[in-house]
């Protein structure tokens, strides 16, 4: 079975519209390329019990879980506490993180900054070879920051951990609308029930009307389905295939 993933975005700033999330879109694309099936994304406020409830559920339901946001020195950075509560362990201060913070702040680390040295008891520190601070991993939950630049750097340091059987993709751009196209797609799924098929209309592009995506972990199955679709579609409606 392919790996499954869930993403938890933590932050009142996302729910209020003050900040536009970029991490979920990035992570979905990267995980897809690695062959991981993202099953759910949720956005929740900076509340310890809500974080704990979501983390506990996601950790049970998915192979890997990523949290984004709520890690730092301020009052609303409560993700670590929420993850610890989900796993029913206390929060402890890690000596390596204290050392890294003291080095970063050149010996002038504040008590507030030391909050960033706290982890759930029993958690690991991973992916610290290429970034300044390692990532906290509690069982199958990776705790990542909300700042997109740092989020991406930390994920890049970890990405090979998640590689699975690749998902192969073909795009077919057609010059007919979904109303006409639907019958062809429905019949294709009857013959290829394991195919992941998507249909995305485009109203402002003069070149095509619908982008059709065909996906499968079996390249041969995908190629066969693509050939069938192209054969069945009326002459002249296919704009391009990528």
Image (spheres, rainbow, N blue to C red):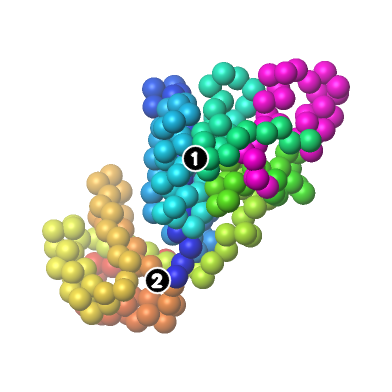
Residue 22 is at least partly visible in this image: no
The quadrant the C terminus occupies is: bottom left
What residue sits right under mark 1 in the picture?
A: 86
Quick check: 131 left or right of 209? right
Residue 106 among those drawn in magenta: yes
Q: Residue at x 27, y 58 (%)?
A: 199
User: Dot 1, crowdedness within 10 Å: few (<14), some or many (≥20)?
Assistant: many
Q: Secondary structure at mark 1?
A: helix
Quick check: 86 left or right of 205? right
* As drawn, 131 above or below 183: above
Q: Nearer the viewer, residue 86 or 214?
A: 86
Whole-percent x, y for residue 112 in the image: 68, 19
Whole-percent x, y for residue 186 in the image: 18, 69
Among the two numbered marks 2 and 1 on one chain, the one whose residue lies closer to the N terminus: 1
* As drawn, 234 above or below 177: below
**Marks 2, 1: nearer the viewer:** 1
What residue sits right under mark 2 in the picture?
A: 216
Q: Which residues are magenta?
A: 96-124
Q: Residue at x 46, y 67 (%)?
A: 2
Residue 71 is at least partly visible in this image: yes
The span from disc 2 to disc 1 (Cα, nearest Å) is 35 Å
* As drawn, 178 above or below 67: below
The quadrant the N terminus occupies is: bottom left
Q: Nearer the viewer, residue 169 or 242?
A: 169
Quick check: 145 left or right of 6? right
Q: Residue at x 57, y 18 (%)?
A: 75
Q: Nearer the viewer, residue 163 or 229?
A: 163
Q: Residue at x 67, y 26 (%)?
A: 115
Quarter of the view holding residue 210: bottom left
> Which numbered dot is residue 158?
none
* As drawn, 100 above or below 154: above
């Amino acid at each position: 079975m392919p790996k499954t993933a869930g993403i938890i975005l933590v932050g009142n700033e996302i729910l209020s519209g003050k900040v536009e999330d970029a991490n979920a879109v990035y992570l979905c694309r990267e995980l897809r390329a690695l062959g991981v099936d993202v099953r759910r994304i949720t956005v929740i406020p900076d509340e310890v019990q809500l974080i704990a409830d979501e983390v506990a559920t996601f950790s049970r339901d998915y192979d890997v879980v990523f949290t984004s946001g709520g890690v730092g020195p301020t009052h609303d950075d409560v993700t670590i506490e929420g993850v610890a509560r989900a796993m029913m362990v206390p929060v402890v201060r890690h000596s390596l993180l204290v050392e890294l913070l003291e080095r970063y702040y050149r010996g002038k680390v504040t008590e507030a900054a030391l909050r960033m040295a706290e982890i759930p008891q029993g958690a690991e520190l991973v992916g610290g070879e290429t970034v300044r601070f390692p990532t906290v991993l509690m069982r199958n939950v990776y705790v990542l920051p909300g700042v997109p630049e740092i989020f991406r750097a930390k994920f890049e340091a970890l990405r090979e951990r998640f590689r699975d059987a690749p998902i192969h993709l073909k795009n077919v751009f057609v010059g007919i609308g979904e109303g006409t196209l639907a019958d062809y797609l429905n019949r294709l799924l009857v013959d290829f029930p394991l195919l992941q098929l998507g249909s995305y209309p485009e109203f402002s592009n003069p070149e095509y009307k619908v982008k059709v995506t065909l996906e499968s972990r079996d390249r041969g199955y995908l190629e066969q389905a693509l050939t069938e679709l192209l054969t069945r579609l009326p002459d002249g409606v296919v704009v391009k295939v990528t």
